[in-house]
């Protein structure tokens, strides 16, 4: 998302670094490049013109903070103005009424059906609501099936619409059925056309009149750039939309639609689609996005992602199992899946401030992700008994697991061997040392099959490698203190020193 604009702006800001102070000359030159960068990103030309004028005015005015370098001053002003351009404050949706009704509108293939399902999941997860889906696209029979499939997948009820029914009746009956089913948020998925046509618009206007939705969300494909903004304008003129969802932002390196839509239509961007999966929907926060565009990361989104994919109780339970060395393949797979829910490692790194400089390194990190998929396939080919009790995995079972997961028997061997080694290590580490001896910190077993550097996700911040948020496992990589007495913070070197002094004192006493 926004990669090419981000790169362009980065090189513009770098040029301000060597400058002593901001003056008409360097501001003029810098802003010319900012203007070009925005035009290349397919931002509406009038929006670009107004934007650069505002930035120039503020750079030349009293607004600049003298404690900042010229580069920092420009970045701060561009950041503020870009936040405004993206819509200013985060716009929440209107959830009044019971049920609250959301109507999805837009062109064919823009992502309405997928977004309706994504929103259902969002409302259930983030707002603890009970969603209900209503397929009202009777012209493309596959659209009804598509929403029904997504509803089954999410365990969300779907109105049994049929081809031949009137879309207005479907929506009215759908809302009634949702109320009867005790659901408090309804998502109406309306029909799309290849381009705007009067008949379609009239149908949408009739649905609006009959159902008085809380929100009419215009869904547009971000990849079509300015065209998405033009279509939004037409839908707004006819339906008075309440907000916009831009889909396929994951594939949009330029971001022209996101940067122009508020200024051109006056309507706010409320959500963005970041992938094909039902969980790939983000609330649109203008300030966070401006920060991402300017390479300053987005720590708040990172924290929210981590929180939403970690179940605290389950993490504590697994932490205890780990301490008792009862951690098995089933627990391991659960943790791998949680880690995956956070998204790609590449995507996560982009949210961390200052990671732009490490962009080339990100490619190297994608290797463990492939290996994680392989390990997951091996574990998934095991029976529950094998996952819970790996010691039953004999050679014939290994051959079956290898066949089931499409890997060599040696890969299964290695995974089982390393897993057993890790359990032994945990036993020792958590107090299983021989009598009278303090538990010793054994060496970590070498990587699982084909995994450089240990368990999946090794080195990720926030806990045991590959185990997000596991309590008590923080700082697994620097475990020097683990073998010492409870509460002791002394290092190995300090202990050695103490032993030496004690020895010397003994000798002195003897003398
Ligand atoms: N990469 C990516 N693909 C998406 C996103 N949202 C939707 N898609 C894909 O876009 C295609 C079209 O999405 P639909 O939800 O069927 O679009 P629609 O607007 O309902 O289409 P009609 O019912 O024909 O009007 C599907 O292949 C989706 O998987 C997104 O945010 N990112």
Image: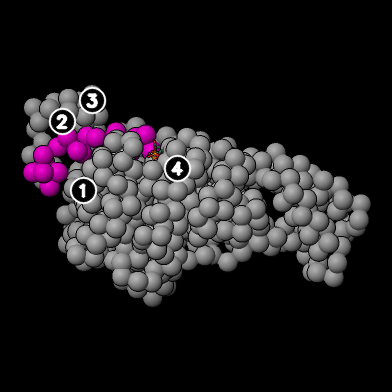
Label number found at residue 199? 4
Which marked residue is nearer to the observer: mark 2 or mark 1?
1
Q: Earlier in the sequence, mark 3 or mark 4?
A: 4
SS for dot 2: helix
In this rendering, the label closer to the viewer, 1 or 4: 4
Report x, y in % for residue 115: 39, 48
Query: Dot 3 corresponds to which residue?
Result: 406
- Mark 1 Cα-neighbour bin, 10 Å: few <14, some 14–19, many ≥20: some
Cα distance in 3D space between marks 1 and 4: 24 Å
* On-image quarter of the N terminus: top right
The residue that mark 1 highlights is: 160
Q: CA distance from mark 2 to mark 3?
A: 8 Å
Instruction: Tell me if I can see residue 226 in this picture.
Output: yes
For marks 2 and 1, give the CA distance: 41 Å
Is 418 situated left or right of 2 in this image? left
Quadrant of the rendered image holding ligand 1: top left
C-beta proximity under 8 Å, tags 2 and 1: no
Q: Position of residue 235 (x, y in %)?
A: 53, 49
Residue named by callout 2? 401
Judge depth for marks 1 and 3 and give the one in front.
1
């Amino acid at each position: 998302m926004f990669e090419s604009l981000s790169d362009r702006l980065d090189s513009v800001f770098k040029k301000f670094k060597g400058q002593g102070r901001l003056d008409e000359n360097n501001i003029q030159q810098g802003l010319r490049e900012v203007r070009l960068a925005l035009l290349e990103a397919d931002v509406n030309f009038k929006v670009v013109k107004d934007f650069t004028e505002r930035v120039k005015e503020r750079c030349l005015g009293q607004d600049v903070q003298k404690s900042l370098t010229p580069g920092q001053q420009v970045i701060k002003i561009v950041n503020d103005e870009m936040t405004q351009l993206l819509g200013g404050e985060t716009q929440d949706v209107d959830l009044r009424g019971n049920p609250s009704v959301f109507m999805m509108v837009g062109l064919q293939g823009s992502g309405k059906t997928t977004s309706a399902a994504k929103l259902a999941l969002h409302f259930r997860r983030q707002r603890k609501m009970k969603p209900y889906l209503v397929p009202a696209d009777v012209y493309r029979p596959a659209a009804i099936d598509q929403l029904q499939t997504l509803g089954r997948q999410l365990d969300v009820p779907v109105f049994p619409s049929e081809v031949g029914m009137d879309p207005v009746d479907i929506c009215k009956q759908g809302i009634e059925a949702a109320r009867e089913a005790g659901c408090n948020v309804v998502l109406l998925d309306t029909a799309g056309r290849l381009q705007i046509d009067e008949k379609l618009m009239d149908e949408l206007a009739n649905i609006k009149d009959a159902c008085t939705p809380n929100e009419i969300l215009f869904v547009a494909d971000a990849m079509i750039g300015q065209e998405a903004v033009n279509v939004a304008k037409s839908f707004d003129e006819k339906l008075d939309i309440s907000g916009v969802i831009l889909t396929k932002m994951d594939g949009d390196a330029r971001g022209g639609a996101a940067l122009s839509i508020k200024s051109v239509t006056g309507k706010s961007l409320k959500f963005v689609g970041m992938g094909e999966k039902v969980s790939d929907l983000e609330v649109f926060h203008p300030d966070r996005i401006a920060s991402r565009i300017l390479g300053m990361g987005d720590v708040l989104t990172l924290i929210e992602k981590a929180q939403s994919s970690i179940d605290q109780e389950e993490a504590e339970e697994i932490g205890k199992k780990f301490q008792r060395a009862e951690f098995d393949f089933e627990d391991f797979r659960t943790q791998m899946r949680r880690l995956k829910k956070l998204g790609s490692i590449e995507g996560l790194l982009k949210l961390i401030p200052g990671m732009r400089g490490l962009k080339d390194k990100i490619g190297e990190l994608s290797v463990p992700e492939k290996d994680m998929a392989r390990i997951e396939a091996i574990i998934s080919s095991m029976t529950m008994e094998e996952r819970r009790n790996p010691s039953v995995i004999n050679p014939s079972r290994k051959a079956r697991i290898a066949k089931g997961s499409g890997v060599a028997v040696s890969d299964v061997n290695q995974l089982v061997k390393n897993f057993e080694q890790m359990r032994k290590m945990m036993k020792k580490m958590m107090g299983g040392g021989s009598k009278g001896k303090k538990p010793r910190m054994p060496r970590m077993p070498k990587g699982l099959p084909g995994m450089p550097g240990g368990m999946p996700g090794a080195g990720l911040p926030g806990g045991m490698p590959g185990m997000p948020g596991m309590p008590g496992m923080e700082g697994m990589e620097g475990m020097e203190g683990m073998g010492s007495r409870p509460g002791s913070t002394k290092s190995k070197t300090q202990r050695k020193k103490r032993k030496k002094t004690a020895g010397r004192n003994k000798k002195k006493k003897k003398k």
